[in-house]
Image: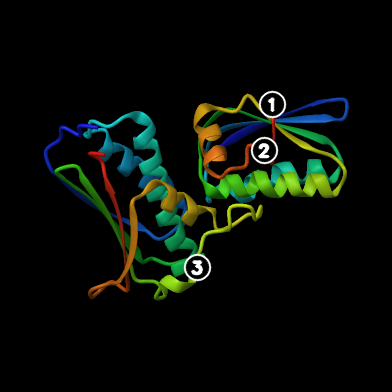
Amino acid sequence: MSYKVTEEGNISTVHLDGEIDMDVTEKAKEIIMPLIEAKKEVHLNLKEVQYMDSSGISVLIESHQKATELGTKVVLKEISKSVLKVIMMAKLEQILNLD
Amino acid sequence: MNVAIKSITEQRDFVVSSSSLKEVRSFSREVFEKVNINQDLKDELVLAIAEAAQNIVKHAYQGEDTDDKMEIKISLEKGHLEIGFFDKGRPVEEKNVRHRKIDDIKPGGLGTFFIQQIMDAVVFKEGEKPWINHLVLTKNLNS
């Protein structure tokens, strides 16, 4: 997994790339959580994520919950077909902010 | 769906580690490339296999560093798919393996939920020596 972060005003956009599994979830959290803790609105661009498993979905849930707790939000942008399928399999499409 | 495939049996060993999961997916993709099923189903089967392998790392070995290997065996005969997982970790008791409730939004327990969504049956067996655990996932690909 690789990533790039861009900033515009109070919005931080994290562009994730590659496959997100248990092996990279800590790295993903290290990127995303400090932005949420800084009360940024975080956009996760998932266009280039070709694979995500339950560990990756757990990162999305934790990020969403942390953001809600801190009064900000995480928005999932340009979700790839394979990631959307897993989000729907987890029945989270009504819970997470999908754009 | 007509699977239109000869029988396949392929197996491979992997070090029990989260860093092996990518290899597990590659192996699974290679096997399913030989089977005439649609890409969505292939992706689902790869996910189920990777989730089961992840459960071995997470639960049977509780994330500990080890040199132990796990074995994954994929067999297809007349459209009946059977995937076996063998490991030497802590014995897994089926009653302790639960997926999260569907309206309980929390991280964790999703892997088992995915496996159960994708496969027709999930059976835990006692492994024959030298294995401790033997998990069998099955799916009829003809339906």
Q: Are marks 1 and 3 on the same chain?
A: no
Q: Residue at x 73, y 44 (%)?
A: A64
User: Which is closer to the viewer, label 1 or label 3?
Assistant: 1
User: Viewed as shown, does residue A87 lie left or right of B94?
Assistant: right
Q: Image quadrant of residue A93? A: top right
Q: Residue at x 15, y 35 (%)?
A: B5
Label 3 packing within 10 angstroms: few (<14), some (14-19), many (20+): few
Q: What amino acid is at disc 2?
A: Gln
Label 1 packing within 10 angstroms: few (<14), some (14-19), many (20+): few
Please give the label number shown on residue B32: none
CA gap between label 1 and label 3 equals 38 Å
In depth, the one of B50 and A7 nearer the eye is B50
Q: Residue at x 45, y 60 (%)?
A: B55
**Which residue ends up furthest to the left in the rendered image?**
B6
Q: What amino acid is at disc 1?
A: Asp
Disc 1 target residue: A99
CA gap between label 2 and label 3 equals 36 Å
Element at badge 1? loop
Q: Are marks 2 and 3 in contact (CB under 8 Å)?
A: no
* Residue B25 on image: x %, y %: 38, 43
Element at badge 3? loop
Disc 3 target residue: B64
Disc 2 target residue: A94
Chain letter of the residue beneath label 2 in the structure image: A
Chain letter of the residue beneath label 1 in the structure image: A
CA gap between label 2 and label 1 equals 11 Å
Q: What amino acid is at disc 3?
A: Glu
